[in-house]
Amino acid sequence: MTATRRPDAISLLALPGALYLAVAFAMPMALLLITSVYPESRLSIDGYARFFRDPFSWTVMWNTIKAALLTTAICLLVGYPAAFAVARATAALQALLLVALVLPLSVGVVVKAFAWTILLRSDGVVNRLLMAAGLIEEPLRLLFTQPGLILGAVNVFLPFMVLPIFSVVKLIDPRLLEAAATLGSGPVDRFVRVTLPLTMPGVVAGVAFVFSMSVSMYVIPTLLVGDRYKTLSTLIARSFLFMRDRPLGSTASVVLLVIAVAVVVASAMTTRSYQRSH
Amino acid sequence: MPIERAALVLIWTAMAGVVVTLLAPLVVAVAVSVSSSPVFNLPPPELSLRWYRRTLSLRELWPSARLSVEIALLSTGISLVLGTLCAMAVSRGRFPGKTAVVTFMVSPLMMPGLVVGVAILQALREVGLRNAYAGLLIGHVVITLPYVTRTVLASLSLFDFTLIEAARTLGCSYPRALLKVMVPVLAPAFLTSGLFAFLASMDNYPISIFLVDARNKTLPILMLQYLEESPDPTIAAISAGLILLTIVVLLAADRLVGLRRLADF
C-alpha cells in the first residue's frame, strides 16, 4: 500500500466515529498527559519527582501489580484446564457451560462484588464450607484481606481467561494429536509440543485481558478490601474525589496508564512475533 | 493411560470449580434478597419479599435506574451508527493507515476506565460543560463505540460484497440492496455488539463516578453508595432484579442469534 494513494469516498464514513473519539477520548487523554508535566503553565516534573520519592507510592504500585499478577496467574492455572473441558463437552453440555460463563460476565461488577462480601464473611459460605470439609478449625479472616480481594477478582475475571483459550482449543485439529501419537510421541510430549504451542495465542489474549482489567480494577478492591489495601485506582479516585489533590491524581493516572498500555503492547508484540515464527 | 485419565480429572475438576464459583455470587445475591433477615444470614431463615417492597420506597433508586437505562440505550444507539459507518469504511474503503485506525477505534477498551474518566472530567471542565447528563452520554459513547466497531468489522470482513452486485444486477437500487442483503447478514453482529455495549454502559462505574452529580447518579454509583452507607438486603433485591434483567436479555439474544456467538472472543 502506498501512502500517496488518495482515500476514496467510502473511507469518509470512518470520519464521524474517528473524529468523535479524537475529541472525546484522545484529546482529553493528551490533556491529562500534558497537565501532568505542565501543571502551572510551566514545564515541571515535580509531580513525578514527588510521586516517585514517596515510599508510599512504591507500596501502592507494588500492591497494584501484585494483585494483578496473582489474579492473572490463578485465572490462568484454573482457566486453562477449564477451557479444555468446555471444548471437549458434548454439544448440550457445552451450551450449558457457555451459559455459566457468559451470564456472570454480563452481570454487573457491583452486584458480584457485593455478593462476595457476603460469601467471604467470617460466618459466610466459604468459611463454613472450609470448616465442614475439616480444612480449618476457626473461621478465616477473608473479607478486608488480600486473599479475599484476589478470590473476588479471580472470580470476576475468569470468563475473560476461559473464553479466549476455549476459542483456540476448539480449533485444534484432533488429527494433529493422532499423527503425533502415531509417530511415537507420548501424552506429555504431545501436550508440550503440539497442544501448548497451538493454544498460546488464546493464552496471550486471556492474560492480557485479565491483567489489564485487574491492574485497573476499582469496585472490587473498594468493596472487598477497603482503605487498608491501596491500589493505584483507589489512590486516583481518592485524590480526585475526596482529597482534591489534582497533581497527585494526574501523576498516579499516568503511571497506571503506562502500566496498562505496556501490557497491551507487550501482548500485541508477542502475538505478532509468534504469528511470524509459525 | 494413567496420565490421560489424570488430565481428564484435572480439566473437569477445574471446570466444576469455575462453574460453582462463577454462579455462587449470583445465587447468594438472590438468596439474600428473599430472606426475611436484615443481616445476611444464609440459608434464609424465612422467605419474604420485604426487601423488594423496600426498593419501592427508595426515593433515589427509580430515577437513577431510569437514568442508567436512558444513557445505556442512547449511547448504544449512537455507537451502533458511528461504529457501523466506521467498520464499513475500514472494510471497503481505500486509505492509508487502516490498522492504526482500527487500533485507535478499539483503544478506549484497553485503557484503565478510571484514567479515561479523569481525563474526560478535566476536558469537560476545561470547555465549561457542567451538564451531568451530557457528560455521562459523552463518556459512555467512548466506551460503547469500541464494542460495536470491533464486532461489526469482524462480521463485515466475512461478508461477500459480490452479493450486493448480484442484487443490483437483479434490479435492486444500491440503498435497497444494502438494506435487503447486507443488513440481515449483519443483524447478529448488531445484536451481540449492541447487547455488550448496553451491558457495559449499565455496569460502568469508573468513568461515571467522575461525571455524575448529586442529582444525576447512575445505578452502579448509587448501589456502591448504599453499600458504603447502609448495607442491608435491599441492595440484594436490586441485584436480583439486575440479574433477572440480564437473564431475560441473554435469553432473547440466544433466541435471535444463538449463544455461541455471544461467547465468541
Image: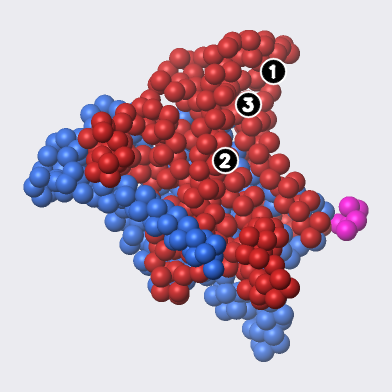
Chain colours: A red, B blue
**Pair 1/3: label in front:** 3
Q: Which residue is mark 2?
A: A211
Residue A25 position (above or below residue A55): below
Residue A17 screen position, x and y as percent: 63, 50
Q: Secondary structure at mark 2?
A: helix
Q: Give the quadrant of the N terminus of chain A.
A: bottom right
Left or right of residue A182, residue A277 in this image:
right
Q: Is residue A115 visible?
A: yes
**Pair 1/2: label in front:** 2
Q: Secondary structure at mark 3?
A: helix
Q: Which residue is mark 1?
A: A37
Q: Earlier in the sequence, mark 1 or mark 2?
A: 1
Residue depicted at x 41% and y 33%:
A147
The image quarter in which residue B181 lies: bottom right
Q: CA distance from mark 3 to mark 2?
A: 17 Å
Label 1: how many Cα within 10 Å (few below 14, some 14–19, many 20+): some
Residue A145 position (above or below residue A120): above
Q: Which portion, as a residue range, is magenta?
A: A1-6
Q: Is residue B120 visible?
A: no
Q: Give the quadrant of the C terminus of chain A.
A: bottom right
Residue depicted at x 45% and y 61%:
B9
Q: CA distance from mark 1 to mark 2?
A: 27 Å
Left or right of residue A20, residue B138 in this image:
left
Q: Earlier in the sequence, mark 3 or mark 2?
A: 2
Residue B245 screen position, x and y as percent: 32, 56
Q: Amino acid at mark 2?
A: Phe
Q: Which residue is mark 3?
A: A254
